[in-house]
Amino acid sequence: MPPRRVIVTVLGLLVLLHFYIGWRLIPASGVPLAGAVGAGLLLALSTVLMPAGLIASRARRFKRADQLAWAGLLAMGLFSSLFVLTLLRDLALGMLSLFDAATPALVQGSAIGVPLLAVGVTLIGLVNARRVARVVEVTVPIKDLPAALQGYSIVQISDVHVGPTIKRGYLNAIVTKVNALQPDAIAITGDLVDGSVRRLQLHTEPLARLVARDGAFFVTGNHEYYSGAREWIAEMRRLGVKVLMNEHVLCERGGESLMIAGVTDFTAHLFDESHRSDPQRAAAGAPDTVRARILLAHQPRTAPAAAAAGFDLQLSGHTHGGQFFPWNLFVPLQQPFTAGLNRLAQLWVYTSRGTGYWGPPKRFGAPSEITRVRLVAA
């Protein structure tokens, strides 16, 4: 539980930001008194719902915890767009006022348009987030890849975030879609859960149905460490998923071998020093006959260490592709890549936009994905 001072600070900030939205939009919209009061009450409700929803997701004994979590997270998504659009409106009107172009009609129309646009974006984002992720096909050229490994396919899912609003049915649909692709291997690149094994065990059971010729593999993300990483590692193994903790396995085809390695999350050592991420250790002991080296690493910023360790391809997630505007603009401040296939020296890095979502059930401009990676000779 966060310290009381942090809670008070966050609540105070929420009150100020909601007040700013109301102050800038309600008087300018020209709505009658009843409408203004109603809008003010909705903003006050949002201020309360957002923290209440986050707390409810941790309250097992509260019968309506899931419903309150849904309400709070939807409010968070709407507030995010409402605040950003209000801020952009103010900046635009400020620029127009320099040229005496901020007419009363424009001021009023934009004050009405901002909440309508925010609601529209939030509804579209909800539909995008809740539908089953689309399949994205990615071809990765590997130098000197032998014919026996040509077309080797790895289906990647990442950042599902089973938790307050993502439950068993959502994950079950993902598993069914993954199995239909009949991959050689399945990679789960972290942030699978948001909550303890005790609370979510029922909802992650569909992972036991994953089927691939060489198996399903899992590496930890930062959210596993928020949720009890050791317990989740044991649970993944119970479900038949191979957990790669700075280690690798070899997959053979026609006398040729391919290495699938995995590292713990980039920040794992902050929670457990024995879990420090180490691509060199993950590759240690691999025979010289390995013809393709694949690394599963939750965060793209593992890439420099992966390149130094001699990997050909790194599969990552973590970024969600930004999930929705404007957060995509901030991802490059922390990660070298936001989404898609990129190159670092001799290493290919594919960054998934994620198969689920975190926080608000909202995706806008960054669709979720199930990724099928095919290896081909360069």
Image: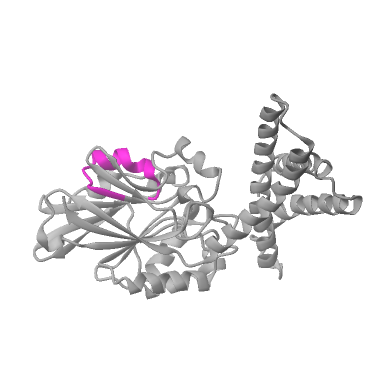
Residue 11 in sight in this render: no
Percent from the top left, x then y, of residue 59?
67, 62
Instruction: Indicate the quadrant where residue 277 lies.
Output: top left
In the image as oriented, which residue stretches furthest toward the right? 33
Instruction: Indicate the quadrant where residue 101 lies.
Output: top right
Percent from the top left, x then y, of residue 239?
39, 71
Residue at 48% in and 52% down: 366
How many numbered discs sit on the rendered protein?
A: 0
Residue 241 in sight in this render: yes
- The correct choice, above or below, for 5 with respect to 351 in the image is above
Percent from the top left, x then y, of residue 295?
28, 51
Query: What are the residue bounds of the magenta stretch?
Result: 298-314
Q: Going by the image, does 112 lie left or right of 165?
A: right
Q: Nearer the viewer, residue 160 or 368?
A: 368
Residue at 42% in and 64% down: 134
Residue at 17% in and 51% down: 286
Q: Is residue 351 magenta?
A: no
Residue at 73% in and 26% down: 100
Q: How is the image coloured?
A: one colour
Q: Is residue 309 magenta?
A: yes
- The correct choice, above or below, for 111 with respect to 296 in the image is above
In the image as oriented, which residue stretches furthest toward the top? 98
Q: Nearer the viewer, residue 323 or 286?
A: 323
Percent from the top left, x then y, of residue 151?
20, 62
Instruction: Indicate the quadrant where residue 370 lies.
Output: bottom left
